[in-house]
Structures are given as C-alpha cells and as structure tokens.
Amino acid sequence: MLRRTSWAPQLPPEDFVRACEGTCERFVAAEGFVCRKGEPVDHWIGVIAGLAKMSSDWATGKTASYTGIAAGGWFGEGSMLKTEARRYDVIALRDTRVACMKRETFHWLLDHSIPFNRFIINQINERLGLFIGLLESERLADVDARVARAIAALFHPVLQPGIEARIAISQEEIGLLAGVSRQRVNRSMRILEEAGYLVAKYGGVTVLDLDGLRRFGG
C-alpha cells in the first residue's frame, strides 16, 4: 500500500524502510471500530482493503455520517497534527484491512520529506473541500443529491487514489454513508441511473459521469 502512494516512491530507500517499519496492519471485522471517538490519536490510518465510514454518535442517539473511506484512502492527518483526542468514529462497513502508521513515524516524515509534506497539505485541503461540499449537501440538498454526493465522495481522485470506475458497494452501505434508508437509496439510484450518471447492479456501482454526480441537485 505504501508503494502505491504518491509520496513513498520518492523517499530514499532507507527512509522508505523506516516508513514501513513504523507501519503495521490490522484486520477489522464488519461493524467493528477502526478507531473510536475520544481515544488518543496514535496512528495515521489507511484502508488497504474494504470500506469504512467516518461518523460521530451523539448523546441524543443521532448519528452524523461524514464520509466513506475506500481502499487506498488515508485519514486522520489533521488529528495527528494536534494532541486532542479523536473527534469521530471510523467503523468498518465490511471486513476491512487497515495500515496504521505510528505517530512518531508520521512526524519524522513531516520533518524529513518534502514530498510527504506536500501530500499531507494537499490531503488536508482536499478533505476540507469535500467536507464543505457534504455539509452544504446535508443542509441544502434533497435526499437524491445527498446520495449522489455520498457516492461521488468515494471516487475522489486525491482522497481515494487508484479507485476504478466501479466500486463494490451495496445499497445498504450507501445508505449508511448518506444517512438514509436502503429503500430510499434504491429510489435515488434509479433516478441517478435514468439520468445517465451511473449504472447500479447487484453488489456494485459504476460511475459514468462523476462531475454530474457532484453537481446533482446543485
């Protein structure tokens, strides 16, 4: 997974070895916690295989879903730059393998690698833009647009690098990301398919017009 990032191949061999030695792999079963709100932020985390959801449960019983993280995506860089406890949960929507880079390794790379620095700055900038768009969708858009943008977020070229035009994802998983029921997702998917933005088949979605999904309902 490290070799597939944009920054790791630019490291000197000895620095790449150090990055690998500071990174371990974990398996998280479906519905398990990749990380939890309130715990110390000791690792920068990337999804090797599977699908996870970033969300937050409130004392009122409500859940706010932020975004999904597919294979190739990394998250938590903002938290790694601060000393506060983690402010969100990340839950595996299916069996998921993750890479966990130690805080010490993360900060050593920040101190020694210009390509890594550029990657982190770009990552934070892109995630900020994504969250502003999702917040706008949540407050102003209808359910169909929320579903469209939840799907589009999984195909973000920077935050989900290397993802292909088709992703294996169920309507139930899309509903968890968009914060709506599976039945309502089914209706939205038919609308989006009829409009020519995607093709939905059992167990997966193929995106035909990513820009269209991002602008849908806007």
Image: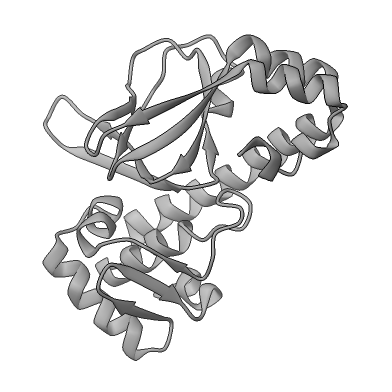
Q: How is the image coloured?
A: one colour
Residue at screen point 11% across, 32% down? 61
Q: Say whether residue 89 is visible.
A: no
- List x then y, in percent, for residue 197: 43, 82
- Residue 13 vs residue 182: left or right? right
- List x then y, in percent, for residue 147: 32, 65
Residue at screen point 42% across, 12% down? 85
- List x then y, in percent, for residue 43: 52, 18
In this rendering, the answer to whether 137 lies above or below 211 is above
Q: Say whether residue 101 is visible.
A: yes
Residue at screen point 67% across, 45% down? 4
- Residue 204 vs residue 103: left or right? left
- Residue 81 vs residue 167: left or right? right
Residue at screen point 42% across, 55% down? 136
- List x then y, in percent, for residue 125: 65, 42
Q: In which quarter of the image is the N terminus?
A: top right
